[in-house]
Image (tube, rainbow, N blue to C red):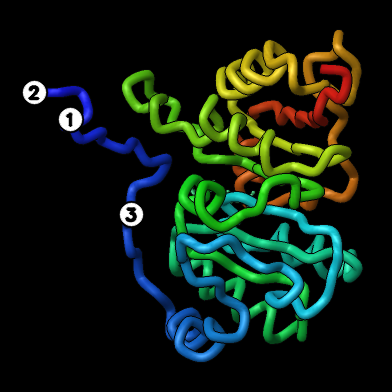
Amino acid sequence: MKDSTIKQKTIRSYVKREGRLTNAQQYALDNYWAKHGVMFSSDILDFQSLYKRRAPLILDIGVGTGDSTLNHAETHPENNYLAIEVHRPGVGQLLNNIESNNLSNIKISNNDVIDVLQNQIPDRSICQVFIFFADPWPKTRHQKRRLINKQLIELLKRKIVIHGRLHIATDWQDYANHIQKLCQSDPALINLSGSKSYSSPRPNWRIKTRYEARGLRLNHNVWDFCYGLNLDR
Ligand SMILES: C[S@@+](CC[C@H](N)C(=O)[O-])C[C@H]1O[C@@H](n2cnc3c(N)ncnc32)[C@H](O)[C@@H]1O
């Protein structure tokens, strides 16, 4: 069999489980998706027509129920937010909260971020990327599922604007080590806390979501990372 005929199996960073939608989440998906949702397509998004204005774009990846996105978008009305989440109950919850808080600066995609980045996001268009508490996949045999890997970082480096930033937080030590090695060894990235620092101070604007609270209950530390693009390369 020729190499080109071998179908590559894609490893996803999540397991699709529909879970139970509450009535409120189902209501939000039925009634608010058309207003705040972004359908998947192979066409590049036009952010100005999507948000009906020009503003710095923040990409929040794997938002869960979107509490952190909601808080940031409420306190920074000057930014546009694209929240990405594969799990529909979380999308429903965020849709409800967008409506009840009357926000117009958050749009939601219900797709794998890799597909969204590869197909819909223009190069050099994202000012900040948030990846907070990505699923840790702690078992060795599952670590190939981790979202933060070379493929994602390569895509983000193309999509972030020249003075943009990548913020990551995790409460899993070996995921933190993996993230630190991946980013620190990449000559196109700069550790904004200094090249000798392992991680960054916790930003005071990052609210404590239930994933961080759970980590702290388990006596985990929490590591923040903040990287920019190396313009000298
Ligand atoms: C542990 S939760 C963290 C939620 C949120 N960031 C927080 O800090 O509260 C990770 C989320 O990432 C989502 N996720 C995992 N892989 C994803 C992917 N490839 N694209 C979009 N979302 C993804 C999962 O469904 C899950 O809701």
Q: Is mark 3 within 8 Å of ligand 1?
A: no
Pointer 1: what residue?
Answer: 6
Q: Residue most toward the left?
A: 1
- Element under disc 3: loop
C-beta proximity under 8 Å, tags 1 and 2: yes
Q: Identify the secondary structure beneath mark 1.
A: loop
Residue at label 3?
A: 16
Amino acid bearing label 3:
Lys
- Mark 2, residue position: 1
Label 3 Cα neighbours within 10 Å, binned few <14 / some 14-19 / many ≥20: few
Which of discs 2 and 3 lies nearer the camera? The answer is: 2
Amino acid residing under circle 2: Met
Report the quarter where the C terminus lies.
top right
Question: Percent from the top left, x then y, of residue 138?
Answer: 44, 26
In terms of sequence position, does the residue under pointer 1 or pointer 2 come before the other? 2
Residue 139 makes an appearance in the image: yes
Expressed as whole percent of the image width and height from the top left, the position of residue 224 reads 76, 31
Q: Circle 2 — which element?
A: loop
Query: Which comes sooner in the sequence, label 3 or label 1?
Result: 1
Q: Which mark is residue 25?
A: none
Q: Where, by quadrant of the figure, is residue 184 drawn?
A: top right
Against 146, is 164 above or below?
below
Q: In x, y percent, where is residue 99?
A: 68, 85
Residue at 69% x, 53% y is: 59
Query: Viewed as shown, does residue 224 lie left or right of 35?
Result: right
From mark 2 to mark 3, how far is it between C-alphas? 31 Å
- Looking at the rendered image, the disc whose residue lies closer to the viewer, 3 or 1, is 1
Task: Say which amino acid is labelled 1.
Answer: Ile
Q: Earlier in the sequence, mark 2 or mark 3?
A: 2
Residue shown at 59% from the left, 27% from the top: 172
